[in-house]
Amino acid sequence: MNEQHSVSDSSRIITERRGHVLLIGFNRPEKRNAADLALLQQLALAYGELERDPELRVGLVYAVGDHFTAGLDLADIGPRLGPDGLDMVPDGGIHPWQVDGQSVSKPVVMAVQGTCLTLGIELMLASDISVAAESTRFGQIEVARGILPFGGATIRFPRTSGWGNAMRWMLTGDMFDSREAHRIGLVQEVVPDGTQFERALELAERIAAQAPLAVQATLASARTAVREGAAAAEAGLQPALARLAVTEDSRIGMEAFVSRRPATFVGR
């Protein structure tokens, strides 16, 4: 038991490469995966690894244990809040909630279960596809703690779910279930308890099998439309198409189409 605690204390986030997918696991189950500074920093470093390594095409975020996350470990984080907020991104890391102007250029899929509070919802909103176990309970409860959501919910929740749906949950701090999360678009699929990781991995591997430069260009175009508007995204469509059309993967994709065989993309 002591050995297990020492491992979890030193490895708040565990990573594993599964082909072209980087598995990123919350690993503090004895605290319901509440996020202290060590967890936040290790998560940022995992996102940096995903971004830098050309062999990695998709991230899959999940959690060890019965719960995705109970939110911030306020006992650890509270004293660290300074006049500029919380400094949590070490050198080589990327802000997982992507609220500092830098985004990860590769898709992130999430699998959630049990309790998913505050920063867990915000991580879903900052990701691309989320799968939830049927019994998952969600809560954006910051107002009940005297703070505001500072990981992007105020920006992304209304955009994802509509103003009224977002305010219903952000301003009350009430808990909601996976059915409601699916109804408002926070979750893309609800699956039987215990199968959320396998389903999320299926989706991540499906994405990873596509041409990675094309996936990243698609993601970038959609993000440009959200951040800068339709006109900015429209202006980039033809240049992006021209860049992709001369890649090796474009040739591989065309040959696969003609020969009616599956394509094996190389990422260049």
Image (cartoon, helix red, strand yellow):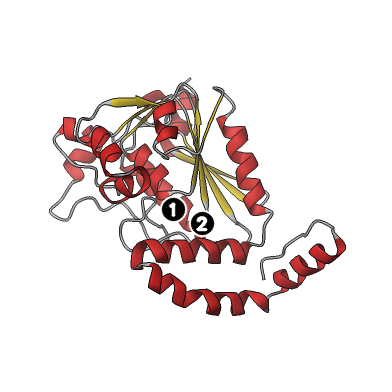
Q: Nearer the viewer, residue 60 or 47?
A: 60
Residue 99, position as x, y percentages in the image: 31, 56
Q: Which residue is mark 2?
A: 49
Are discs 1 and 2 less than 8 Å apart at CB? yes
Is 86 rendered above or below residue 180? below
Density class for disc 1 (Cα within 10 Å; few <14, some 14-19, many ≥20) is many
Location of residue 149 in the rendering, given as x and y in whole percent from the top left corner: 24, 43
> What amino acid is labelled 2 in the image?
Glu
Q: Secondary structure at mark 1?
A: helix
The residue shown at (48%, 65%) is 220
- Secondary structure, mark 2, is helix
Report the residue marked by disc 1.
45
Q: Indicate the quadrant where residue 71 lies.
A: top left
Q: CA distance from mark 1 to mark 2?
A: 6 Å
Is residue 19 rendered to the left or right of residue 143? right
Q: Nearer the viewer, residue 60 or 137?
A: 137
Report the amino acid beneath label 1. Answer: Leu
